[in-house]
Image (cartoon, rainbow, N blue to C red):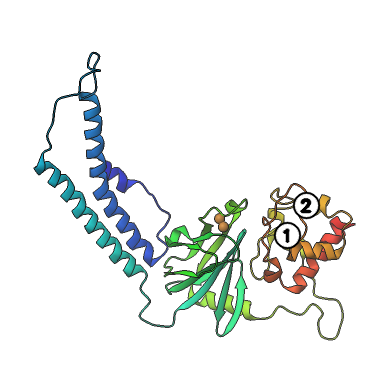
């Protein structure tokens, strides 16, 4: 019954990668092997505790003299040893299999850079480098993730893909994944890394190849210059929409998710209330607060909560528009 229960419970999210199938099968085998051992050991312990417990009047007795049973001891040593060796061998084979490089050679590499408290994904596509705050990968193609960190330990994990590895200061760790299911899945930091750990969440999008290529094209096409040729007004960037929805080219998180701002109607409480902290501040201060948020920290808040990668993720015109907007609605 324990085995059935163990197998029936839906422990994991959807099997989003080639690796997930093999890992889940391995999990099922572990359940089948370990549940009987657990039930047997627990039963023996409970039985012994109930039947051989000390009774009133036996306080000064030593209990009956018992000599070991050699045959029993050989059996209870040999069976677990054989099981352990067998399971370790199986685990090794699965690990070897899921870490194999694809036969076809040229494999996509993406750097997942962790920092308090966000991931930045660095791509090289068709010889062009670019960064994104959201992860995009094509379906059915192996990706090698190089995982790094700018500050403390993080852990790069997409539960639907099962693979998970620490981002360790000073070194690059990696794993491979072949996403097989289209859709959007949470990216989670799985190593306690500070106050904003719980907010270190992004999204992995698995796209059909054609859509992925279109996204790469969009990302590698430079953002239009703020001032069009021939002068005239700059094409309007809707700074308020940027603030509330984060509709930037790179998918940077919306400011309003964390900040309260009356004009934008946002109520986020993770970061300071901008109507208060920006009162009387000039454009230079606002600019600094966006691109280098730890330079000056509002009272009652901590360093490192606001990701320091907005300067990289937002285009120059987007930053300028945000600064101008914030100065108008909150600064003066
Ligand atoms: Cu990064 Cu937890």
Q: Element at badge 1? A: loop
Identify residue for label 2.
298
Tell me where residue 97 appears, x and y as whole percent: 32, 69
- Up-down: is 217 above or below 15? below
Left or right, 213 with respect to 244, comes to: left
**Closer to us: 286 or 318:** 286
Picture residue at 51% right of the left edge, 69% below the top: 171
Residue at 56% over, 79% down = 124
**Which of the pair 120/141 is nearer the observer?**
120
Identify whether 131 is placed above or below 90: below
Mark carried by residue 111:
none
Above or below, 69 against 287 in this view is above
Question: Farthest residue toward the left?
Answer: 71
The N terminus, quarter of image: top left
Q: Secondary structure at mark 2?
A: loop
* Label tally: 2
Which residue lies under the disc numbered 1? 294
Which residue lies at the image location 89% right of the left edge and 55% below the top edge? 280
Q: Quadrant of ligand 1?
A: bottom right
* Residue found at the far top of this picture: 57
Are the residues flagged by discs 2 and 1 in contact, CB closer than 8 Å?
no
| Quadrant into which the C terminus falls | bottom right
Label 2 – label 1 distance at C-alpha: 9 Å
Q: Please provide percent x and percent y for residue 156.
A: 50, 62
Residue 277 % position (x, y): 82, 52
Residue density around tag 1, few if under 14, some if 14–19, many if 20 or more, within 10 Å: some
Horizontal side, residue 213 vs residue 95: left or right:
right
């Amino acid at each position: 019954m324990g085995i059935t229960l163990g197998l029936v419970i839906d422990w994991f999210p959807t099997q989003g990668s080639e690796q997930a199938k093999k890992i889940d099968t391995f999990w099922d085998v572990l359940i089948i092997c370990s549940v009987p051992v657990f039930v047997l050991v627990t039963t023996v312990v409970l039985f012994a505790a109930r039947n051989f417990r000390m009774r009133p009047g036996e306080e000064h007795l030593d209990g009956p003299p018992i000599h070991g049973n050699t045959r029993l001891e050989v059996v209870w040593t040999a069976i677990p040893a054989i099981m352990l060796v067998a399971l370790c061998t199986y685990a090794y084979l699965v690990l070897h299999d899921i870490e194999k490089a694809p036969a076809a050679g040229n494999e996509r590499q993406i750097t997942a850079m962790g920092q308090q408290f966000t991931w930045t994904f660095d791509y090289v596509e068709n010889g062009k480098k670019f960064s994104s705050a959201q992860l995009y990968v094509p379906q059915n193609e192996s990706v090698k993730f190089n995982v790094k960190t700018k500050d403390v330990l993080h852990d790069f994990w997409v539960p639907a893909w099962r693979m998970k590895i620490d981002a360790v200061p000073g070194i690059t760790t990696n794993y491979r994944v072949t996403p097989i299911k289209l859709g959007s899945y949470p990216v989670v930091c799985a190593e306690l890394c500070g106050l904003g750990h719980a907010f270190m969440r992004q999204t992995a999008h698995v796209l059909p190849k054609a859509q992925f290529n279109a996204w790469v094209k969009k990302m590698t096409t430079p953002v239009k210059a703020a001032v069009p040729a021939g002068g005239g007004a700059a094409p309007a960037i809707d700074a308020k929409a940027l603030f509330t929805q984060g509709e930037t080219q790179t998918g940077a998180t919306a400011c309003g998710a964390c900040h309260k701002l009356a004009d934008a109607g946002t109520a986020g409480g993770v970061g300071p209330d901008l109507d208060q902290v920006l009162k009387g501040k000039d454009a230079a201060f606002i600019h600094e607060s966006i691109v280098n948020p730890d330079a000056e920290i509002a009272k009652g808040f901590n360093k490192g909560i606001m990701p320091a990668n907005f300067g990289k993720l937002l285009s120059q015109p987007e930053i300028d528009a945000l600064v101008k907007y914030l100065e108008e609605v909150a600064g003066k």
